[in-house]
Amino acid sequence: MTPRPSKILLVNSNDDILAKLDSQLTALGHETDKATSVRRGITALQSDYRIDLVICDVFAPKGTGFVFLNSIKSNPKQMFLPFILTSTDCEIKMVQRAIDLGACDVLTVPIQPDDLNRRITRVMKNGKPTVLIVDHNELILGHLEFVAELEGFKAITATTSQSAMEILKDNDISIVLLDADMENPSSLEFMGDIKAHNYNIPVILLTRHSRKYSTEKLLAIGADGILTKPFKNTEMANTIRHLLLRRKVTSIA
């Protein structure tokens, strides 16, 4: 399964700027949603978990862009959502404050299409983490995909280990959810291939109580996390966040 098109939320009270950004982004192949105030932007995020990027004017009414940014970064379901602030006059002090609060970029508008495309492409490469979910059961796969996106991640699915490996080669995957009963190759062989290719991607194994390998054994041979079926949606989301944050801290160190 290939990733869906990116969806971008635009928040700006200036109708001309809003329309211009919308036209430019649509021409670049993105889906958009529009809001004329921070309050409406917050409502849009609450009602659509598929939003992959927020572009908000720093002086948006009903709460500044900084308020909106802080709200997003303090919400576990939105903490990885990339955020770009826009302004007609980007002063150094304002730019520094935006970066300190977690903004990925600050744009001076209006902006040329080529520059906009370049900046968004760079931001999206470090956008919402993408979870590769591997399970031979399509019903379970669909449920896990829905939960992952609802919890603030992008998701790609695979029903075989072979197709999952091809997805790993062609996509920027942040973490893998792997059913422990995959075959040809087996889940353990697939996990070994991930480690052998030095992808530096955490792997969470989805196991059953009756598995012949203990949790300690699975962790010892390379699993970064274990979820025993049936598990709660929040348990899955919290495990993914914990491993992604640990990976981020490790990469910085």
Image (cartoon, grey):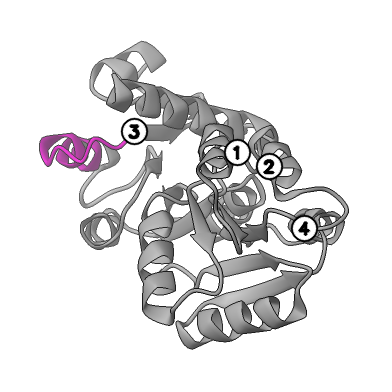
Type of the residue with mark 2: Ile
Give the answer, above or below, for where 93 lies relative to 118: above
Q: Is residue 21 magenta?
A: no
Task: Measure how far apart labels 1 and 3 are at the Cα level.
Answer: 19 Å
- Quick check: marks 1 and 2 in contact, CB under 8 Å? yes
Amino acid type, residue under disc 4 in the picture: Ala
- Comparing 66 with 40, the one in front is 66
Of discs 4 and 3, which sits in the foreground? 4
Label 4: how many Cα within 10 Å (few below 14, some 14–19, many 20+):
many
Neighbours of disc 2 within 10 Å: few (<14), some (14-19), many (20+): many
Please indicate whether residue 40 sits to the left or right of residue 172 in the image.
Answer: right
The residue range painted magenta reads 189-201
Circle number at residue 202? 3
Crowd tier of the residue under label 3, counting other residues whose Cα lies within 10 Å: few below 14, some 14–19, many 20 or above: many
What residue is pinned by disc 4? 60
Q: Choose the circle earlier in sequence order: 4 or 3.
A: 4
Which mark is nearer the camera, 2 or 4? Answer: 4
Label 3: state its secondary structure.
loop
Q: Looking at the image, do the residues carrying marks 1 and 3 touch, with CB atoms under 8 Å apart?
A: no
Relative side of 18 to 250, left or right: right
Residue behind mark 2: 72
Q: Is residue 199 magenta?
A: yes
The image shows a total of numbered marks equal to 4
Q: Residue 214 vs residue 65: left or right?
A: left
State the image quarter where residue 122 is shown: bottom left
Q: CA distance from mark 1 to mark 2?
A: 6 Å
